[in-house]
């Protein structure tokens, strides 16, 4: 490959970068973007930040953002100019900061330009890798087709063969039949020509995603970073007057003959228009955003922008997932709080009832002791020392602060209700003893 070198001073290169942008200079001298960026880093030449051009184009003062060039300004650098690479035209796609308003008229409309700040959600190293890949991405027709794409291609071919057969056998055939599997459905909105283009585009994108650490899933979604990104391709259609088939023409002739003899003859339903594919593709991302062919630029010329859009979509999917996870966590915490509150209420109710039951037992014990005192004061033959001791033990049995265990009645469960305690008392006294 024929290689030329251009001599340029550090100061001249510094000035041009801050006038045209890093990608603008790369286009001007037909340089490899990623290698040119590395050269500037190695030579300690400051470059504008990703948001510099946005602020400048908005009319904000950016004069204080341009750092001084340190080191020898007159040092000569050598730029390798690759004559084997075409000069920037409609097939070139270099990443660039937003173009200054004064430069927009000089920028070819067919050149795909994207703002480097669109990938600010990536760390610097990953962003540089993605931008470098995007700037060099080209269709490689000699590359072997991805295994998953091969399966989809076969399924589509089988489905389209079934479509043709169905159309041939059915006069009232209306455009298509329903695909019977996911693989056939993926290319449903594409002609055979559109499928061949879509396969080449997807194959190139998938291989680049894999180089960047991602993968393609069985459903042709792409796993980028930590999330799956879905895309599909569709082809535009034009409406054209319908041309009668031999079978339709024969049906019309038969109808004209039948209507002469039978008033109830049924006219065949023949559509007036057909929709035919026009070869214009569009790639649609999960959020509904799409890129499409234009009169001057095909999707094959915008592979770099497709890659950038896929990474943007991965960030959107990530944020949506994080929002769902945050909402799920909030709901789980809310449910936990409600459950804990309910459990606390149930526990408080249980403790309150137990407290009331204990207080009732204490009240009974107090009343028994008052009764003992009144009976002793009044006197009588039945008020013996033995009876007083017995009655005091029963008061102590009722009293939860003493909780005496009775020789015959056992321990009283003070926390239970009066009904439950009475039932337990009756159970103890009604046992049957077998000898």
Image: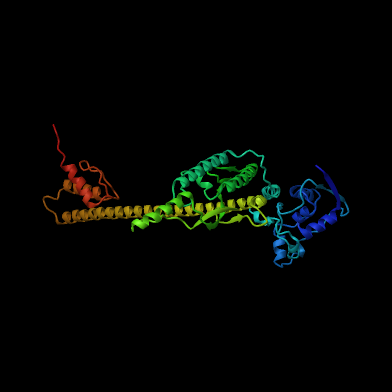
Picture quadrant of residue 211 = top right
* Residue at left offset 64%, top offset 50%: 307
Exactly how many numbered labels are in the figure?
Answer: 0
Q: Is residue 148 above or below residue 324?
A: above
* Residue at left offset 69%, top offset 62%: 54
Is residue 423 toward the left or the right of residue 334 in the image? Answer: left
Measuring from the top left, give residue 399's x and y in whole percent: 26, 50
Residue 71 visible (yes or no): no
Q: Quadrant of the N terminus?
A: top right
Is residue 111 toward the left or the right of residue 192 in the image? Answer: right
Measuring from the top left, give residue 170's x and y in whole percent: 44, 48
Residues 434 and 312: in front is 312
Picture quadrant of residue 48 = bottom right
Residue 274 visible (yes or no): yes
Measuring from the top left, give residue 387's x and y in whole percent: 16, 47
Residues 294 and 429: in front is 294
Residues 427 and 39: in front is 39
**Residue furthest out toward the right:** 74
Q: Is residue 10 above or below residue 427?
A: below
Q: Quadrant of the C terminus?
A: top left
Q: Is residue 101 above or below residue 308?
A: below
Measuring from the top left, give residue 184's x and y in whole percent: 51, 44
């Amino acid at each position: 490959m024929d290689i030329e070198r251009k001599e340029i001073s550090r100061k001249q290169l510094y000035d041009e970068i801050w006038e045209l942008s890093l990608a603008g200079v790369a286009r001007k001298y037909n340089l490899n973007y990623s290698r040119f960026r590395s050269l500037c880093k190695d030579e300690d030449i400051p470059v504008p930040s990703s948001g510099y051009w946005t602020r400048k184009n908005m009319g904000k003062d950016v004069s204080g953002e341009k750092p001084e060039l340190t080191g020898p300004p007159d040092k000569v650098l050598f730029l390798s100019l690759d004559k084997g690479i075409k000069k920037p035209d409609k097939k070139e796609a270099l990443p660039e900061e937003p173009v200054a308003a004064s430069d927009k008229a000089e920028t070819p409309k067919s050149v795909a330009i994207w703002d480097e700040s669109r990938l600010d959600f990536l760390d610097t190293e990953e962003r540089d890798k993605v931008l470098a890949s995007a700037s060099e991405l080209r269709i490689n027709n000699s590359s072997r087709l991805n295994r998953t794409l091969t399966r989809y291609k076969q399924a589509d071919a089988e489905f389209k063969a079934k479509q043709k057969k169905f159309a041939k056998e059915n006069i009232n055939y209306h455009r298509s039949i329903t695909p019977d599997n996911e693989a056939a459905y993926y290319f449903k909105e594409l002609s055979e020509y559109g499928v061949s283009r879509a396969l080449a585009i997807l194959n190139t994108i998938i291989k680049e995603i894999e180089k960047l650490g991602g993968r393609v899933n069985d459903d042709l979604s792409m796993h980028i970073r930590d999330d799956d990104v879905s895309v599909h391709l569709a082809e535009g259609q034009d409406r054209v007057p319908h041309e009668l088939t031999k079978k339709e023409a024969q049906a019309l002739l038969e109808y004209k003959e039948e209507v002469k003899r039978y008033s109830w003859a049924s006219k065949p339903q023949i559509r007036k228009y057909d929709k035919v594919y026009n070869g214009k593709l569009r790639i649609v991302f999960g959020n509904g955003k799409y890129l499409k062919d234009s009169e001057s630029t095909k999707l094959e010329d915008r592979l770099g922008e497709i890659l950038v859009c896929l990474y943007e979509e991965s960030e959107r999917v990530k944020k949506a997932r994080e929002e769902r996870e945050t909402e799920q966590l909030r709901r789980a915490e809310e449910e936990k709080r409600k459950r804990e509150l309910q459990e606390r209420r149930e526990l408080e109710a249980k403790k309150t009832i137990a407290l009331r039951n204990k207080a009732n037992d204490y009240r009974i014990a107090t009343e028994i002791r008052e009764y003992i005192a009144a009976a002793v004061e009044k006197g009588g033959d039945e008020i013996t020392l033995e009876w007083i001791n017995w009655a005091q033990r029963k008061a102590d049995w009722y009293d939860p602060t003493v909780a005496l265990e009775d020789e015959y009645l056992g321990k009283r469960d003070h926390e239970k209700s009066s009904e439950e305690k009475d039932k337990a008392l009756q159970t103890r006294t009604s046992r049957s003893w077998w000898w």
